[in-house]
Amino acid sequence: MKTKEESTDYMKGIVLNLPETPGCYQYLDDSGTIIYVGKAKNLKRRVSSYFNKEQQSDKTRLLVTKIRDIRYVVVKTEEDALLLENNLIKRYKPRYNVLLKDDKTYPSIAITNEYLPRIFKTRQRHVRGATFYGPYSHVPTMYALLDLCKELYHPRPCRLPMTQEGVINGKYEVCLDYHIHNCAGPCVGKQTREDYMHNIDACREILKGNTGEVARRMKEEMMRLSDEMRFEEAGEIKRRLDLIENFRAKSEVVSNVLHNIDVFNIESEEKIAYVNYLHITNGCINQAFTFEYKKKLDETDEELLALGIVEMRNRYGSTSREIIVPFPVDLPAEYAEQAIPQKGEKKKLLELSKLNVKQYKFDRLKQAEKLNPEQKNTRLMKEIQTQLGLKKLPFRVELFDNSNIQGEDAVAACVVFEKLKPAKKEYRKYNIKTVTGADDYASMKEVVRRRYIRQEADNNPLPDLIIADGGKGQMEVIRQVVEDELHLDIPIAGLAKDSRHRTRELLFGSPPVTIGMKADSQLFRLLTHMQDEVHRFAISFHRDKRSKRQTASELDQVNGIGEKTKALLLKTFGSVKRIKSASAEQLQATLGQVKGHKLFNALHAGEDTGKDI
């Protein structure tokens, strides 16, 4: 049993590392029972709000006291989160969720299997033989689809059961809908059944989201009407076509054709593998869980996924005859039919499972690194070692940068990172002594030479990696000094920037080659931060030096006027020019009688002030 403090720290770790994506969250009590299910556009922001005491209501405060664990499922859209929340609430009936007593669900669209099928909205999905599309959490979307089918293909709106014998024997009569052109009259043979069923099939394609063929036919019709100068009718077709092309009815969570299917995916590391499980019933996810295996004998992903499939199906009592997996798994043929989809709805479910397992892996890593920051830095050092092929971990990294304006006030800087953390006591500033004009390469040579001759002379540690704030040219001049002159074996990398002065790529080797890294990876962001740090340090030193040169003035030539006095004068008068134009009385008011008199005389020596002081 965890103490209150341990439980609080555990929950805080989960909340801090939640993804900022749409999804559903589940709160569990100390017995592992789900007590609340919610949806969120931003999981981290929404769940965090429960633990903000300033925003807590009495009911929320009571709920929070019961929470001992948090689970969540990430999805791609808010609508998917809404549908998943609805399904999970029905399945688990959590204590703190509002449960609808009539157990209404989101509406669907049904197409019956009658002789002349009907299309209508329903909340009941148990009509025998009917095909259902949805459910739709956004009801206007559902009505837009129904209206589209109605406008394009006029399925019969009446509820009268119709048989083939009744139509043949003339049992039915046309109604008002026929006269107002809402129906083509298939019940009395004014529209053939073949034509009617063709229209119903087109409606099925629209409801499935397969609108390509429908849109193609509509474009042809629109062009024909346009060629016939029937622009008003062509414009109406264009309006319907836009409605089709702008609508996206598909959902990763909902599909009318998927029922009783298990979905599995895996992400693997050197010592741990993560397995995600989704169960699909009636087109909805009603179970989602991610867990991990600690490897002991270098098990393959295929072996671990097979173990995970059996474990999850046993745990949740699944009897699904079909499982969706990313690759073939060694299971008995009679156990379940394996599907490895390459496209379509099943492929999207497999990708959703992959998204969840990646997110779980990422969150576990972030939680571990929050508790042990050294673990993160060790991982990143290992990644640098692997990417660059270094002989040892880069515990000490040194970066160099130059700064000057057209050769004036030329300076350079060296910053040091130990275990990827700034070692600010080791930072060094250098005035360029042997180079005249703006020659960055010669300046870099001078600084690197001075740096490592001094380090060796003082028996100070040498870096495991040198990084130049620049591309191939800077790397080469550093190499010439380090390897050719000083005969040191230190790896050299470079961080090149683009035309907008943003870090573009990491270079390494001789001759330098680009090391492939994603711009949004942790390692790339770390290297960019290191480059920004050496650039900041060099620029600040350059500004200080330039500022001192620019502020050097006649004040510096006056005995008794030190830095503090000079700062006081500049603060009071704003500039040297104003100080010089100040009266003796004004200077004495600021500095006192003696020092003010002395400064006034020094600034106006040789001038006829017209005053005798």
Image (cartoon, rainbow, N blue to C red):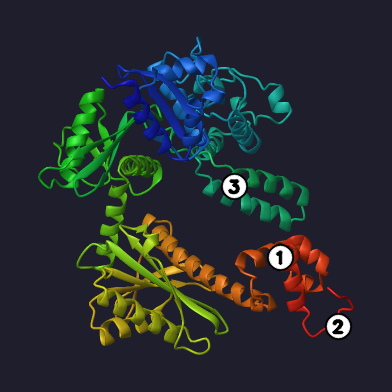
Q: Amino acid at mark 3?
A: Glu
Compared across the picture, whether 571 is left or right of 454 comes to: right
Which quadrant is home to the C terminus? bottom right
Examine the rendered structure and indicate whether residue 208 appears above or below residue 564.
Answer: above
Examine the rendered structure and indicate whether residue 245 appears above or below residue 72.
Answer: below
Tag 2, which secondary structure? Answer: loop
On the image, the x and y values in percent for residue 214 come to: 56, 46
Q: Assess disc 3: are there few (<14), some (14-19) or many (≥20) residues with their C-alpha within 10 Å of its C-alpha.
A: few
Which of 572 and 217 lies nearest the eye of the viewer?
A: 572
Q: How far, Cα to Cα, is label 2 from label 3?
A: 89 Å
On the image, the x and y values in percent for residue 360 come to: 34, 39
Q: State which tag comes first along the sequence, 1 or 2.
A: 1
Q: Quadrant of residue 144?
A: top right
Mark 3 or mark 1: which is in front? 1
Tag 1, which secondary structure? Answer: helix
Q: Residue at x 50, y 72 (%)?
A: 498
Query: Which residue, given by chain and number where applicable, does mark 3 sit on?
Result: 245
Q: Amino acid at mark 1?
A: Leu
Q: State which tag comes first along the sequence, 3 or 1.
A: 3
Q: Amino acid at mark 2?
A: Asp
Q: Residue at x 72, y 50 (%)?
A: 234
Residue 357 - label: none
Residue 569 - label: 1
Tag 3, which secondary structure? Answer: helix
Whether residue 215 is visible, yes or no, is yes
Which of 464 and 319 lies nearest the eye of the viewer?
A: 464
Query: Which residue, given by chain and number where applicable, does mark 2 sit on?
Result: 608
On the image, the x and y values in percent for residue 142 come to: 58, 31
